[in-house]
Amino acid sequence: MVPVNPIDAPLRLMCVHAHPDDESSKGAATMARYVDEGASVVVVTCTGGERGSILNPQLQGRSEIEENISAIRRAEMERARSILGVEQVWLGFVDSGLPEGDPLPPLPDDCFATAPLGEGIARLVAEIRRFRPHVITTYDENGGYPHPDHIRTHEVSVGAFEAAADPDYRPELGAPWQPLKLYYDVGFSPARIEAFDAELVRRGLESPFAEWREHAAERLKRAKSEGRRLPNITTRVDVADWFERRDQALLAHATQVDPDGWFFAVPLEIQKQIWPTEDFELARSLVDSTVPEDDLFAGIREKVTS
């Protein structure tokens, strides 16, 4: 095993995401909490989101947006980054788009999902060796949902987690660094959605999850038939006090979010009461910590010197 580099303060968290806006819909409150507690947090955005659809009905059909979507999404990312208080870097790949149809069309030749996996790993290793995170978060092997860029983000993150500490791997990319924990984001677990749906119904409020509930059994059956592993929550970080900031960051991605959509349909009061955590699955650890956890830095804090 490659020796672990000496650990120094402050605590450092790297969150690897596929597109601008993913960081604000997945684990954003956790990032904001750790920033406020003095940790250093960086978001690595693998693509520029160039092929993302305009999901805000108020902005659809406007040519000045469609023709400048790349620059607009970068500006949106900068606003969200500032709200969360994190550092952000671009990995430099082009959005693959979400293929639709039966059969699915081929992916573009120039996109992230068709780029050599080794190139993505190398670029992320360079960022890991620069920032030296103690903890990395990313998506599971199913991408959280099967977008090709999310699946490739998982593959790149896992590969870089291993390669960054190897002194024989691309020494020109910086001094070796071993991250100590790797987590998968489990933001949209079935249990969370079911809990919100039940509470909205109990209060006599309209639930945006009725259709989801109707098809839940079918989705579970399909997942099992395809051999997809279900997420396993090991770590729940209490971040209710940071939900407002999470929402502000997500709304900064104005082209990507419907402000009247389902993401904002559950009142914050209910979210804080019913599900006050953001959830993760511990995928790899080089330190001792007891599962279940309530802290991504569990097992690491005591090792960090001031």
Image (cartoon, rainbow, N blue to C red):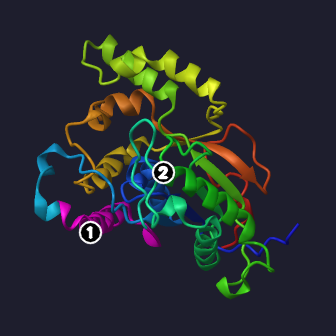
Local SS, label 2: helix
Amino acid at circle 2: Thr
Farthest-out residue, right: 1
Crowd band around label 1 with a 10 angstrom C-alpha radius: few (<14), some (14–19), many (20+): some
Cα distance, mark 2 to mark 1?
Answer: 23 Å
Q: Name the residue tied to disc 2.
A: 30
Crowd band around label 2 with a 10 angstrom C-alpha radius: few (<14), some (14–19), many (20+): many
Q: Position of residue 103 (x, y in %)?
A: 45, 38
Is the C terminus in the top left, top right, bottom left or bottom right quadrant? bottom right
Q: Name the residue tied to disc 1.
A: 75
Residue 259 lies, with reference to residue 59, above or below; the image says above
Q: Position of residue 258 (x, y in %)?
A: 22, 43
* Residue 99 visible from this viewpoint: yes
- Of residues 118 and 110, which is closer to you in this image? 110
- Could you tell me which residue is drawn at 63 percent across and 33 percent down? 228
Query: Is 75 one of the magenta-colored residues?
Result: yes
- Of residues 162 and 180, which is closer to you in this image? 162
Residue 266 falls in which quadrant of the image? top left
Residue 264 falls in which quadrant of the image? top left
Q: Earlier in the sequence, mark 2 or mark 1?
A: 2
Q: Position of residue 130 (x, y in %)?
A: 60, 79
Q: Badges 2 and 1: C-beta atoms under 8 Å apart?
A: no
Query: Is 296 one of the magenta-colored residues?
Result: no
Residue 120 vs residue 174: left or right? left
Local SS, label 1: helix
- Could you tell me which residue is drawn at 67 percent across and 66 percent down? 160
The magenta stretch spans which residues? Answer: 66-93
Is the N terminus in the top left, top right, bottom left or bottom right quadrant? bottom right
- Of residues 86 and 74, which is closer to you in this image? 74
Farthest-out residue, bottom: 172
Predominant SS along the magenta part: helix
